[in-house]
Amino acid sequence: MKTVTINRLNKYVDKEVEIKGWVYNRRSVGKIWFLILRDGTGLLQCVVVDGECDKNTFNLEQELNQEDSVIVKGKVKKEPRAIGGYELGVSEVCVINHTTEEYPISKKDHGADFLMSNRHLWLRSKRQNSIMRVRHQIVKAIRDYFDDNGFTLIDSPIFTGNSVEGTTTLFGVDYFERSAYLTQSGQLYQEAGATAFGKTYCFGPCFRAEKSKTRRHLTEFWMVEPEMAFVELDENMTWAENLVGFIIQRVLDNCLIELEVLERDISLLENIIPPFPRITYDEASKILKDNGSEFKYGNDFGAPDETILSEQFDKPVMIHRWPANIKPFYMKRDEHDHELALGVDMIAPEGYGEIIGGGQREDDIDILTNSIMHHDLPLEPFKWFLDLRKYGSVPHSGFGLGLERVVAWICGTKHIRETIPFPRTMARLEP
Ligand code: 4AD
Ligand code: MG
């Protein structure tokens, strides 16, 4: 007898199969009872009829608890009215592990904190399962996009000797006789990569000691960071919008079942086709003023400001040319206005906030040296970074896309903590 998974049952209609999984639910009607089986690939209604299976199996009904692990044997039938469109006529249920304790996550409503504390079990639920599947597809789409467009994967290190995105969100670690930090961004190493390979990317975890308890911040999150030699700000924005368009298309192609479980309005996603609107920081400021925001020119946009901006467009919007003094040391100045940096942020629709940050990098060794000093950063750890401007410096650009923010937007989840298997926030290190 063949062992199969629920998502492949269409290939086994009228065949005897064996499925390994967990009890999701059960209910009975007279001489029949139903076992709803979960195997990680889907749900299946298994029908147990007195006389059509062995006596032990029929008597299991009162014994089985939610999440008991079982192996079920039976014949696959097409049944349009059942979940997933198939049904199993059971001949035997074999119990692998039975618990007498009630499963902590029942069908009733639980608070977010309780569910987060039971994340190791919560991942089994239909909704969490769907979010993780979408996340997987997005990761795969991102890799395919760069792999198929001439980028080389160059992994950036996680232990670093310097900050990238400001010194206030660094996690320090003991590193033998000296101190080190967990990386905030792999960008600086991609700049070395781009001069060695032309176009590179890294995709891995980044760490920020964010004291904010917002629904958009994690202390450990995943970022993909492409970097390209001989690419200026405008072309950089084109790469960014095409990446996002590609991700959305892939999810629409492969994840319709998951998006339905998540009750996501697909029409809003279908609309996300590049090109995306591009506006300057100055234009964005004007939109905010016109819409009654208390935002002050020269500051970064707050979450409510990003929401106002996103509401003006039905696609992500790219905001470029920012006041240089609120952006990191490595950004190139605009040659037409030295107060401005050639940075770009992409803001997702529907109030999901900034999903991409990037820009054109300073390629002049003297300006960059001054900028490092101006930001009160020590020069020594950046010596290697300055070498990239000493030997064959070229205009170059890149960006970082935050994976969890994109998953949150595409899945329509309110809080970013549902978008990563085991979230790390200020208050949470377990499970
Ligand atoms: O805008 P950020 O800070 O940019 C950089 O780190 C650049 N060095 C990237 C580059 O140019 N290579 O971060 C980039 C993105 C943000 O737009 C956001 O999506 C995500 O990373 N991000 C976070 N996601 C979750 N939790 C946090 N604490 C995040 N901080 C940034
Ligand atoms: Mg940013």
Image (cartoon, rainbow, N blue to C red):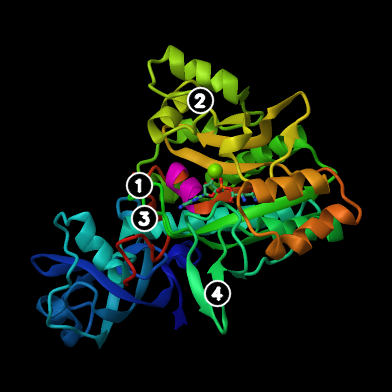
Among numbered discs 1 and 3, the one appearing first in the sequence: 1
> Residue 418's mark?
3
| Residue labelled with disc 2 | 314
Residue 313 vs residue 257: left or right? right
Query: From which residue to which does the magenta span run?
Result: 404-409
| Disc 1 to disc 2, C-alpha distance | 22 Å
Q: Residue furthest right?
A: 392
| Element at label 2 | loop
- Left or right, 159 with respect to 77, comes to right
Q: Are marks 1 and 3 in contact (CB under 8 Å)?
A: no
In the rendering, which numbered label is found on residue 215? Answer: 1
Secondary structure at numbered mark 3: helix
Which is nearer the eye, 131 or 11? 131
Dot in front, 1 or 3: 1
351 or 382, which lies in front?
A: 382
Q: Give the labeled residue for mark 4.
A: 179
Residue type, numbered disc 1: Arg
- Residue drawn at x 56%, y 72% as measured from the top left: 180
As shown in the figure, which amino acid type bears the numbered disc 3? Answer: Glu
Q: Is residue 219 left or right of residue 93?
A: right
